Image: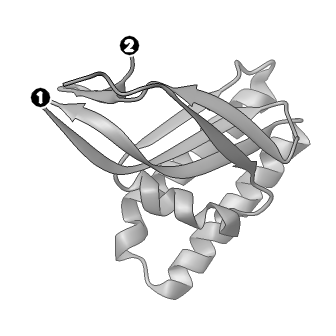
Amino acid sequence: MSKPRDQTVELQLAETGTELWPAIEAAQYARLINHEPPANVAEEEAITRFVAAFASCAESWQDLQVERRAGALAGLSAQLEALQRCGLYLHWAAIEAGIAESDRRVTMPLAIVTISRTNLPEARVRLPGELEVTRDGGPTTH
């Protein structure tokens, strides 16, 4: 089996939690969250709170009633505002990614989230053509 090619993924700037709905849906299956090193305690706290809120949303999304989903998205909006007050911005995408699991390759939804000081409407990331799931969790890249 030939090795899949690396891919460039275009990410969108998130201004509200509602925009993250597709990323939350994908994050129920797999997610990659990357952020720049925090420059101070306020940035570290804002990043930590957003990541925790996003993970909590993804992990409980399926069980939430419509009204509760709206509340969860509003909570993410508040976390985005906290990031922006620190000069940090979030870009996201929801894609179908190839993942190597044992000796087989599967395709599943993947949420990609980056937190950086870039506030451009779009950003790009380069991903390996295939991610590998490890026993301790995953995915990992090589």
Is 124 left or right of 2, judged from the image as shown?
right
Give the quarter of the image for residue 47. Answer: top right
Disc 1 packing (10 Å; few <14; some 14–19; many ≥20): few
Residue 4: x %, y % from top left = 35, 27
Please give the name of the residue rendered at 44% of the width and 84% of the height, measured from the top-left corner.
65
Q: Which mark is residue 32?
A: none
Give the secondary structure at mark 2: loop
How many marks on residues? 2
- Up/down of 51 relative to 76, above or below: above
- Up/down of 104 relative to 3, above or below: below
Q: Nearer the viewer, residue 108 or 69?
A: 108
Disc 2 packing (10 Å; few <14; some 14–19; many ≥20): few
Q: Nearer the viewer, residue 57 or 19?
A: 19
Residue 50: x %, y % from top left = 64, 46
Please give the name of the residue rendered at 55% of the width and 86% of the height, measured from the top-left corner.
67
* Residue at the spot of label 2: 142
Q: Residue furthest left?
A: 103
Give the quarter of the image for residue 97. Answer: top left
Is 117 left or right of 97, judged from the image as shown?
right
* Residue at the spot of label 1: 102
Where's the N terminus, which quadrant? top left
Please give the name of the residue rendered at 70% of the width and 28% of the height, measured from the top-left corner.
44
